[in-house]
Amino acid sequence: MKTKHHKDPFNTQCWLCECITDPYQVIAGFFSEAHVYHFRRLIKKLVSHASGAGMYKGYSPGDVLLYSKLIRSLIKAAHALRHTKHSAVTIKKEDIFNKKYYCSHYVNADEWQEFPRCLSEKEYSDPYRAFQQFFGYQSLNSWLQCWEQVVENAFCSDTTSITAPLTVCTHLIKLVEAAHLVDVREVTHVGECVKKGSPLSAT
């Protein structure tokens, strides 16, 4: 009996109008939509409002739905990469603040805003560690359900607070920051477009 493969394994069709099967390209597409600090701020606000800070009134529900689908795809892409043992790029301790290791290729990239806020030194040097920690906390399905609950609760002022909001928020931000570093260091193109500048590793 043949095994059926999911044609849209990372659920990118709903926001990219294209089915991506390469997790690295899911990450590239994710950050082509918005910067790491944009997602970091959005996650903080949604988790805060999902934890009793009242109804979220920032972006329109349609925009939040779009971004929530992006983050769902990122969670799935990180899950596919969670067994990657080591980053393809080795960083010396004296080079840890070199912007080529954390600042994206986009013209409007902000060096200060793009520097990770939540990753440990080891996770910064090897972002795949953050993926492993993320799924060590709970399973893929649990994370997808958790994220869906965060988004739903953020728009409902009378709902029960999500469980362990600070831990959930930290893990989600770490996930985004780690994916950002993978994108900066290892991904050479977004779709068919080659990134500006010299990549550190070919993916």
Image: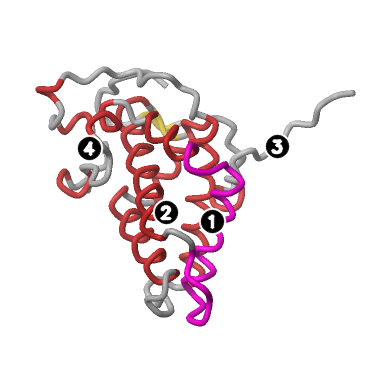
Q: Is residue 55 rendered magenta in the image?
A: no
Distance, label 2 to label 4, CA atoms, is 25 Å
Distance, label 4 to label 3, CA atoms, is 33 Å
Q: Is residue 146 rendered magenta in the image?
A: yes
Specify which label sits upstream in the sequence, 4 or 3: 3
Q: Report if the CB atoms under discs 2 and 1 are less than 8 Å apart.
A: yes
- Residue wearing tag 2: 168
Quadrant where the C terminus is found in the figure: top left
Q: Report if the CB atoms under discs 3 and 2 are less than 8 Å apart.
A: no
Give, as a single range, the part of the protein colored magenta.
136-162
Assess disc 2: are there few (<14), some (14-19) or many (≥20) residues with their C-alpha within 10 Å of its C-alpha.
many
Distance, label 2 to label 1, CA atoms, is 8 Å
Which of pointers 2 and 4 indicates the residue nearer the eye?
2
- Residue wearing tag 1: 146
Q: Secondary structure at mark 4?
A: loop
Q: Is residue 74 above or below residue 25?
A: below
Distance, label 1 to label 3, CA atoms, is 24 Å
Residue at 51 percent across and 82 percent down: it is 158
Residue at 42 percent across and 54 percent down: it is 168
- Residue wearing tag 3: 7
